[in-house]
């Protein structure tokens, strides 16, 4: 899809709202809505939005992990699993 096809003025949104929603959800489109010729908002399929948010979350985790690795803030895998097992045991003991 060309970007030019996905830019619509707010007046178009007002007149064609239900058609736009149907098209956006059926085709997983993203539309840019302009006001006075300036891009103001995005109309996006919820599934596309959720996928984008999940991708961003994973990228943040990767960036943080990479930063920790560069700073030497790491510990062996077996230590991490031992710590988790201890935390789970404490949780289970407090649950009873």
Image (cartoon, helix red, strand yellow):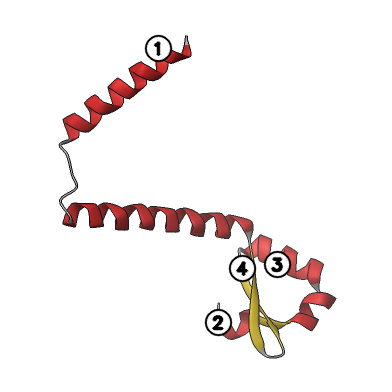
Q: What element does badge 4 sit on?
A: loop
Residue 34 image position (x, y, % from top left): 68, 83
Farthest bottom residue in view:
37
Q: What element does badge 2 sit on?
A: loop
Q: Earlier in the sequence, mark 4 or mark 2?
A: 2
| Separation (CA) of disc 2 from disc 1 | 58 Å
Residue highlighted by disc 4:
29
Q: Nearer the viewer, mark 2 or mark 1?
A: 1
Q: What element does badge 3 sit on?
A: helix
Q: Check whether the beta carbons of the residues at disc 3 and disc 1 lie within 8 A of each other.
A: no
Question: In this picture, is 51 found above or below 93?
Answer: below
Residue highlighted by disc 3:
23
| Separation (CA) of disc 3 from disc 2 | 15 Å
Q: Residue at x 37, y 58 (%)?
A: 59
Q: Residue at x 27, y 52 (%)?
A: 65
Q: Residue at x 19, y 47 (%)?
A: 73
Q: Earlier in the sequence, mark 3 or mark 2?
A: 2
Task: Depth check: give the residue in front, 70 or 46.
Answer: 70
Q: Residue at x 43, y 14 (%)?
A: 94
Question: In this picture, is 57 found above or below 87?
Answer: below
Task: Depth check: give the residue in front, 44 or 5.
Answer: 44
Q: Check whether the beta carbons of the residues at disc 4 and disc 2 lie within 8 A of each other.
A: no
Residue highlighted by disc 2:
2
Q: Earlier in the sequence, mark 3 or mark 4?
A: 3
On screen, residue 48 versus residue 40, left or right, reads: left
Q: Earlier in the sequence, mark 3 or mark 1?
A: 3
Tell how many labels. 4
On screen, residue 92 versus residue 73, left or right, reads: right
Q: Check whether the beta carbons of the residues at disc 3 and disc 4 lie within 8 A of each other.
A: yes
| Separation (CA) of disc 4 from disc 1 | 50 Å
Q: For mark 2, does the 10 Å Cα neighbourhood hold few (<14), some (14 to 19), or many (20 or more) residues? A: few
């Amino acid at each position: 899809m060309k970007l030019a096809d996905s830019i619509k003025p707010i007046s178009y949104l007002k007149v064609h709202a239900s058609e736009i929603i149907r098209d956006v959800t059926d085709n997983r489109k993203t539309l840019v809505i302009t006001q006075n010729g300036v891009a103001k908002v995005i109309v996006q399929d919820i599934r596309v939005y959720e996928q984008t948010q999940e991708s961003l979350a994973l990228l943040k985790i990767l960036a943080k992990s990479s930063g920790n690795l560069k700073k030497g803030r790491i510990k062996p895998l077996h230590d991490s699993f031992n710590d988790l097992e201890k935390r789970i045991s404490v949780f289970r003991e407090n649950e009873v």
